[in-house]
C-alpha cells in the first residue's frame, strides 16, 4: 500500500498537452483533452512522444523523460480520471 494517490488524467496527464496539441490532433481523430480518447490511443501516443515525432518539431517542446514516465505510469495504473 502506498500513501501516494494514483495519477489522474485531470490533474497529471491533461496538463502534458498544450492547447495547440489538442486543437491540432482533433482533426486527426484524437481528442487529447478527453480521457477516454487518450486511453484508446495511449500506446500510440506514448510511442510518438517517446520517439519525439509528436509534437512535431517547431510546434512544441519535445517531451522530457519525466513527462513520458508520468504518462506510462498513468497507463500502468489503469487510466484513472
Ligand atoms: C496516436 C498518436 C498520434 C498520431 C498518429 C498523430 C498524428 C498526427 C498527424 C497525422 C498530424 C498532421 C500532420 C503533421 O503535422 O505531422 C499531427 C499533427 C500534430 N500533432 Fe499529432 N499525432 C499523435 C499524437 C500527438 C501527441 C501526443 C501530440 C502532443 C503531445 C501531438 C501534437 C501534434 C501537433 C502540435 C500537430 C500539429 C503540427 C503542425 O501543425 O505542424 N500529436 N499529428
Image (cartoon, helix red, strand yellow):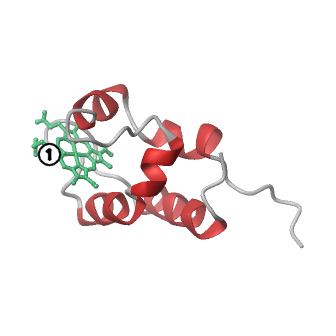
Q: Left or right: where does residue 27 sit relative to residue 69? A: left
Q: Left or right: where does residue 75 sit relative to residue 54? A: right
Residue 44 higher or lower than 19, as above or below: below
Residue 76 higher or lower than 15, as above or below: below
Q: Residue at x 55, y 64 (%)?
A: 75
Q: Is mark 1 on a helix, strand or loop?
A: loop
Question: How many numbered tags mark residues here?
Answer: 1
Q: Where does the N terminus fall, quadrant-wise? A: bottom right
Q: Where is residue 37 in the image (x, y as percent from the top left)?
A: 43, 46
Q: Position of residue 67 (x, y in %)?
A: 46, 55
State the residue in front, 80 or 1: 80
Q: Where is residue 8 in the image (x, y as percent from the top left)?
A: 66, 48
State the residue in front, 25 or 69: 25
Residue 57 higher or lower than 68, as above or below: above
Q: Left or right: where does residue 68 sit relative to residue 47? A: right
Q: Where does the C terminus fall, quadrant-wise? A: top right
State the residue in front, 34 or 1: 34
Q: Where is residue 56 in the image (x, y as percent from the top left)?
A: 16, 46
Residue 31 higher or lower than 63, as above or below: above
Q: Which residue is drawn at 32% across and 43% down?
A: 30
Image quarter for ligand 1 equals top left
Q: Residue at x 37, y 38 (%)?
A: 31
Q: Left or right: where does residue 2 sit relative to residue 67? A: right
Label 1 sits on residue: 57
Q: Which residue is drawn at 50% across and 47% down?
A: 36
Mark 1 vs ligand 1: CB below 8 Å: no
Amino acid at each position: 500500500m502506498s500513501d501516494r494517490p494514483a495519477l489522474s488524467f485531470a490533474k497529471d496527464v491533461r496538463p502534458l498537452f498544450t492547447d495547440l496539441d489538442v486543437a491540432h490532433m482533433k482533426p486527426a481523430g484524437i481528442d487529447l483533452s478527453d480521457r477516454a480518447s487518450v486511453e484508446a490511443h495511449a500506446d500510440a501516443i506514448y510511442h510518438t512522444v517517446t520517439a519525439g515525432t509528436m509534437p512535431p518539431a517547431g510546434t512544441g517542446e519535445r517531451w522530457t523523460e519525466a513527462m513520458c514516465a508520468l504518462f506510462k505510469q498513468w497507463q500502468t495504473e489503469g487510466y484513472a480520471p
